[in-house]
Amino acid sequence: MRLAIVQVGEPVLRQAGKTLTPAEIVSPEVQQLIELMRETMRQAPGVGLAAPQIGLSLQLAVIEDTAENAATERTPVPFHVIANPRLEVGPEIVEFYEGCLSVEGYQAIVPRARSVRVHALDHNGESIVIDASGWYARILQHEIDHLGGTLYIDRMRTRTLATARNFSRYWAGVPIEEVLATLEKKVEKSAT
Ligand code: ZN
């Protein structure tokens, strides 16, 4: 079964989710919700899904990535759950295109920390610490943003926003620095 993914403009995407107790996390209701979120994420398909995206204002997200890409420091991440996460970001910033299942059909360049540490509860309601870098760190930042009511469009380089079709047509494969140089260059005023 696949849950409906709400789209930008839905108020729940702009609210901070409610935290869950360990007892709530291991309850049959939340365990079933996690299963449904896993199926919904896989069918979308996506690499992460946060509870607000299915209309529930909870501090709960699922993550799974099977892809690999050296350019974006992307490596497979097994399925896992984070609840009530607290994020610490490293100093180095990296820029890549990013999209969101709740902002269907668009992509934009988003600066994010290259490495993060996340304190959270797992699917058993137990405390975990995740040290991540590269694409996984980006996924974590994106999902944790959702749990606080923030979307990537709040952080994106606005001039790089593109439809999926135009991204493929004009920007796919173009180095990020070149995209930024092209789209964000200062327009020099002609002397008159
Ligand atoms: Zn998203």
Image: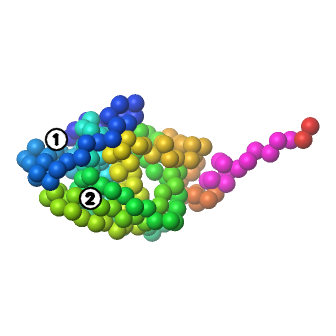
Q: Amino acid at mark 2?
A: Ala
Look at the numbered disc 1 and give the secondary structure of its residue.
Answer: loop
Q: Please say whether residue 11 is visible from this viewpoint.
A: yes
Q: Position of residue 96 (x, y in %)?
A: 50, 56
* Residue 187 sits inside the magenta stretch: yes
Residue at x-position 86% and y-position 41%:
190
* Residue 2 sits inside the magenta stretch: no
Q: Please say whether residue 41 is visible from this viewpoint.
A: no
Task: Give the class, few, some or many, for how many residues have Cα within 10 Å of label 1's Cα (few <14, many ≥20).
Answer: few
Name the outermost residue toward the right. Answer: 192
Residue at x-position 30% and y-position 61%:
119
Q: Position of residue 50 (x, y in %)?
A: 29, 46
What is the span of residues highlighted in magenta in the rendered image? 179-190
Which label sits in the foreground, 2 or 1? 2
Q: Which residue is mark 1?
A: 1
In this rendering, position of residue 11 left or right of residue 173: left
Colouring mode (rainbow / by chain / secondary structure / one colour):
rainbow
**Is ligand 1 closer than 8 angstroms to the Cβ of mark 1?**
no
CA gap between label 2 and label 1 equals: 27 Å
Q: In front here: 95 or 59?
A: 59
Among the 4 quarters of the image, the one containing residue 88: bottom left
Q: Quadrant of the N terminus?
A: top left
Q: Which residue is mark 2?
A: 120
In this rendering, position of residue 161 left or right of residue 5: right
Residue 8, placed above or below residue 24: above
Q: Position of residue 3 (x, y in %)?
A: 22, 38
Q: Amino acid at mark 1?
A: Met
Q: Position of residue 95 (x, y in %)?
A: 53, 58
Among the 4 quarters of the image, the one containing residue 140: bottom left
Q: Earlier in the sequence, mark 2 or mark 1?
A: 1
Q: Quadrant of the C terminus?
A: top right
Residue at x-position 9% and y-position 48%:
27
